[in-house]
Each structure stands twice: as C-alpha cells, then as structure tokens.
Image (tube, helix red, strand yellow):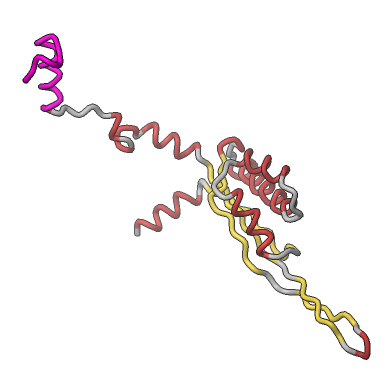
Amino acid sequence: MINKRKRKRDLYTEVYALGQHICMSTHKARRIIDQIRGRSYEETLMILELMPYRACYPIFKLIYSAAANASHNMGFNEANLIISKAEVNEGATVKKLKPQARGRGYLIKRSTCHITIVLKDTSLYEEYEESNICLKNPRWIKKRNPQICDFMICIGSSGGLWDKK
C-alpha cells in the first residue's frame, strides 16, 4: 500500500522519453548512460557534447526531448531536473545476407537498442524538505541534554573549564 502512494506521488515529478530501435550496440550505449546517470540536466548536456562517441548524439536527443516534455507538459524548470533513471535494453536484431563467393551467404547482424531516460524534478522535494525541516533533519533541533547543560553552567559559573575536578 505504501509503494502505491509513493509511486503515485512520483508520477507527478517524473517525465520520461523513450527511444526505440536505435541502431547501435547496447554495450556502446551503456558506456555513456553509466556516465550520466544521477547527474543534473545541464551537466549532462555538457558531458554529452564533449564526449567523442557516436552513441552520444541519440542519447543527447533523448535527454533534450525528455526535458522538453518536462517543461511543456508538466511546467518544470530545466534547471531543477536530474536524470533519475536511465536504462538501455536490447532491441530487435536486423539480419541481412551478404553474398559471398561460390554461392554462399554471410550473415550480417545489425543490433538495435531501446533507451529510456527518466527525469525527476527536484524543486518539489526541496520545498517539502524546507517546510518539514525539523522532521527531516533532527540536527537542527536543539535538544536539552542535562549533562551538556550542567557542563555549560559549570563553565559559566566557575570562570574556567579546568576548575572542575
């Protein structure tokens, strides 16, 4: 029951983009996805522009599309988006026959992959944490510890720390 409530709340803060049948190996795409998972949207765009791999361009387009979905459909600010989930799955393998000598055929396998990018808006979580600061972070609450208070009174009354035996 708790999972359903949490999942329902996350639906309003998450936006995704799905790219299917992208002609590249899953290993090559995962090499880049592992670098950008958990980073902010703006930092991810800079990383993808500077990486020298061919797989960066379709991933760049997907992240840009997910951010456009977030700003247009949900009204999120792009500065508050982070990549919460990024996954690469295998797609269909396209098989072709290349003719060889003596009537033989050589099978060419062209692998494809499906890439899913999920962006999460962090501003809603920040507002929630600011409103419930004493519940989330108990270090902000000054608890009255009798030992520390007696020690502080002792320091204040006797004039020094080393007077107490």
Residue most toward the bottom?
102
Q: Quadrant of the C terminus?
A: top left
Q: Quadrant of the N terminus?
A: bottom left
Look at the image and give the residue range highlighted in magenta. Answer: 147-165
Q: Is 77 displayed left or right of 58 in the figure? A: left
Tell me where residue 38 appears, x and y as whole percent: 54, 47
Residue most toward the left?
165
In the image, is residue 72 above or below residue 25?
A: above
**Overall secondary structure of the magenta stretch?**
helix
Please tell me how many numbered marks the rendered image carries: 0
On whether residue 2 falls in the magenta region, the answer is no
Residue shown at the point (75%, 49%) measured from the top left: 52
Residue shown at the point (32%, 35%) measured from the top left: 137
On whether residue 148 falls in the magenta region, the answer is yes
Q: Is 152 displayed left or right of 81 in the figure? A: left
Residue 67 occupies quadrant: top right
Tell me where residue 59 appears, x and y as whole percent: 69, 52
Which of the two residues, 77 or 29, is positioned nearer the viewer here?
A: 29
In the image, is residue 39 above or below residue 110?
A: above
Which of the two residues, 114 or 46, is positioned nearer the viewer here?
A: 46
Tell me where residue 121 appears, x and y as whole percent: 53, 42
Q: Is 110 displayed left or right of 162 in the figure? A: right
Residue 97 occupies quadrant: bottom right
Residue most toward the right?
102
Residue shown at the point (47%, 38%) measured from the top left: 124
Which of the two residues, 97 or 9, is positioned nearer the viewer here?
A: 97
Tell me where residue 54 appears, x and y as whole percent: 76, 54
In the image, is residue 99 above or below residue 113?
A: below
